[in-house]
Amino acid sequence: MIERDKAKYFHGRKEELKQFKFLLDLSKKRGIGSSFLIQGAPGVGKSALIHECEEIARKLKWNVVKLGIRSLSNETDLFNHITKNTNPKEIIKSQGVNFQVWKASIQTKSREEIDYVNEDLVKSRPTLFVLDEAQNLGIKDTFSNEDKKQIVDFLDRHHNLKTNNGFVMFFGGLSHTRKVLVEFGLSRINEECCFNLQPLDNSSERAIIRDWITEKVKYKGYKSEIEHWIDQITTRTSRWPRHIASYCNQIDVHLQKNEVLTDGQLKMILERGDVLKAKYYNQRCEKLLRTDRKILAKLVQHLPSIFDKIDVIEFLKKEKDLLTMTKEEFWDASVAKGVFHLRVDGAFSIPIPSFKTWLFEQYGNS
Ligand SMILES: Nc1ncnc2c1ncn2[C@@H]1O[C@H](COP(=O)(O)OP(=O)(O)O)[C@@H](O)[C@H]1O
Ligand SMILES: [Mg+2]
């Protein structure tokens, strides 16, 4: 199993985890499917949280089915995913069909036939569908009209699926994911099952960093040094999981087991962490060329902390000779990479801590 999204030391997110457990239980009791949504800026910790939720579900003997957006319109792909950890033989046999025969001829079967079996499989035990990066459903021209119709149909059928075992569809994605799902006809996610993930609380941030350091340091006498390191690192992480990971990964790389904690070590870890943090900022801009980034740097200086699309478009009109793309493309690229972040009130913000400062330092002075 790929453990890519697993946080080495997970802390915080108590409320979200509690609500998730409650929903699993409720879905079983009510015998009806439900949806759960975690949305937020890139690096805020969605995938790590999703991973924790999957673990909870597995411990409770749920079948966790990880999907990509393509699986929603591909019933064979879906079948393969569902049957990864499940034994479909009994189910198919109970329909009076030999499983091997059925599977061998899957390519010749109609969509309805496969969907029918898929649904039976889902109903045969508690099942959690997981779709991370679900905002990508909304990318223009990704799907043909036929595919789109199938996805709408899929979401509609599963959202209220009647099953005595329990069924939950879990979506993760950038802050406009809910909007995208609504466009796909999924409008009924209950408010209490929809979370807009925020930066971690102060003590969770400290606990994560402390865990990474103490793994390396066994000597108890380092207590005050460790707290000093945490003080220093947190001045650069702003309770932002991705930033925290940038520095903690450097602790792992540069601190040997049972090594002495020195100011020199700390300085190096901070410097290397800064470099990794900058890499992450660069990734957010990867769809923009240098001249576009300069315009972005100027734009973010000019924008209020909460703004509308029209503010950006009006600003870009003045810069259109230098832009290497259309104003709409610039807007779409910035939303797709989470540089502009849809707030619940329908306005936008720039969510990633210190991103504006970095942009200005890199691209603001010329
Ligand atoms: N609650 C948490 N506790 C510890 N580490 C976390 C937590 N949330 C996220 N992380 C770490 O922060 C980094 C970014 O988180 P990730 O889940 O990939 O963000 P997103 O999916 O929102 O882009 C990852 O390295 C992840 O392991
Ligand atoms: Mg993620």
Image: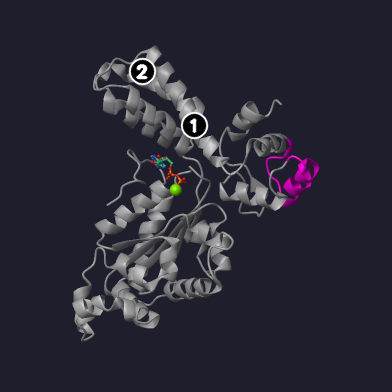
Q: Can residue 234 be seen in this view?
A: no
Kindly identify the amino acid type of the residue bearing the numbered disc 2.
Ser
Crowd tier of the residue under label 1, counting other residues whose Cα lies within 10 Å: few below 14, some 14–19, many 20 or above: many
Q: Position of residue 56 (x, y in %)?
A: 30, 54
Residue ID at (39%, 52%): 50
The answer to if 304 sits in the magenta stretch is: yes
Q: Is residue 170 magenta-colored?
A: no
Mark 1 residue's CB less than 8 Å from ligand 1: no
Q: Which of 354 and 75 is in front in this view?
A: 75
Badge number at residue 224: 2
Q: Nearer the viewer, residue 285 or 220?
A: 285
185, 333: nearer the viewer: 333
| 365 up-or-down from 166: above or below | above
* Magenta segment: 302-322
Q: In the image, is residue 25 above or below residue 276?
A: below
Q: Residue at x 35, y 50 (%)?
A: 51
Where is mark 1, residue-wise? 277
Mark 2 touching mark 1, by CB under 8 A? Answer: no
Give the spatial CA distance, label 2 vs label 1. Answer: 26 Å
- At which x and y percent is residue 312? 73, 46
Position of residue 202 in the picture relative to residue 118 (left or right): right
How many discs mark residues in the rendered view? 2
Please determine whether, in this image, residue 99 is positioned above or below residue 277: below
Q: Is mark 1 on a helix, strand or loop?
A: helix
- Crowding at dot 2, Cα within 10 Å, few <14 / some 14-19 / many 20+, comes out as few
Q: Is mark 2 on a helix, strand or loop?
A: helix
